[in-house]
Amino acid sequence: MARRQVRAAGGGRWLPWLGLALLPLAVPPAAAPGGCPSACYCVATPELVQCRYERLEEPPRELPATVRNLSIVGSNLSVLHRAAFAARPLPDLRLLHLRHDNIQTIEDMALQGLPALRTLDLSHNPLLSVAAGAFAGAPLLHTLQLNQALLAAPLEEQLALALRNLSLRRLELAGNALRALPAALLPAGLEELDLCNNSLQRLTAAELRSLEAPGLQRLRVTLGANPLSCDCALRPLLTWLRIAAARVPDARSLRCTAPPLLRRAVLLHLRPEALTCAASEPGRLETASYVFFGIVLALIGIVFLMVLYLNRRGIKRWLHNLREACRDQMEGYHYRYEQDADPRRTSTIGTPGL
């Protein structure tokens, strides 16, 4: 009995400490200034706010001032108006995801009030218009994601104006059905360019020279999942890859999709001189046809001259016989003409009874 009382007394000494340890779990944490928007929820802390498939027509106004990462997915933000996020200052926001939000227009200074923004994701939006000062409110923006965002309209010129004053380090343009390198969208200082899953069949010599422009010598380009056509027009790209393979992180995985004989072939395993011209190049094919036709005509002419040379004696004899025959014929005509022109023969023929 005494032992039980001692144990109870010993265990009772730990109860106050156990209560203090469990006190934070019993008391809910204080809400951050501004709290979470009613249509969104905060993950772990108010620094990460996610608004998923709530059909918002404008960015929420009651965002926590301490938010660092904001994700708005599946809404209907068809127009990002001027100062769309400036209703409440967000000085610490660094990452902004605006995917699948049906964004079609971005007005001037749409990102005003986001001075610390580093990464902007506008992927999977049918962009139709981008103002020249669309990103001017985010001077520190260094990563811009535009994957599957340029399918609705050609925006290369508009985006070139919008990006000219930014210090971008990474630009993602995957899945935009691009058929050529968007050289106008490459600001000086760009370090990473994602062109995966486009419609690039090759990079021309002029496009490759643009990658060597001042300020782009460190640019790395990702080219995976493009329908590369391994014909003679791909020789500049293959030669460049052999020299600057480090600038294409997925260079070793690039494969040919055409012609059929080289389908699935690893690009770096081919030699530039082994790439032949495809039949889809009518200009070069027509030129080759004319050259071949001229060679054939020249061979026919040479054979004809050789035949004449080898039969020169027979030809000479034939010409001599032809000349003699012509001479005999002309002499016969001359004799008959002289007989017909004789006046005595004419008078004898004309006098009856003689």
Image (cartoon, grey):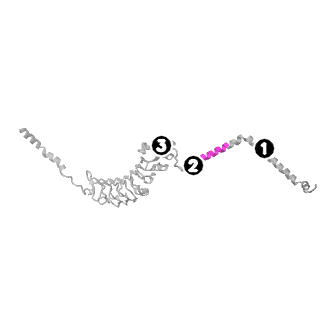
Tell me the element at label 3: helix
N-terminal label among 2 and 3: 3
**How many C-alpha atoms fall within 10 Å of the one at disc 2: few (<14), some, or many (≥20)?**
few
Magenta segment includes 19: no
Residue span colored magenta: 290-303
Q: Which quarter of the figure is the C terminus placed in?
A: bottom right
Q: Nearer the viewer, residue 228 or 210?
A: 228
- Residue indicated by mark 2: 287
Question: Magenta includes 296?
Answer: yes
Q: Earlier in the sequence, mark 1 or mark 3?
A: 3
Q: Position of residue 9 (x, y in %)?
A: 9, 42
Q: Which residue is mark 1?
A: 321
Residue 74 in the image, given as x and y percentages of width and height: 33, 55
Q: CA distance from mark 2 to mark 3?
A: 25 Å
Which image quarter is the N terminus in? top left
Amino acid tagged 1: Asn
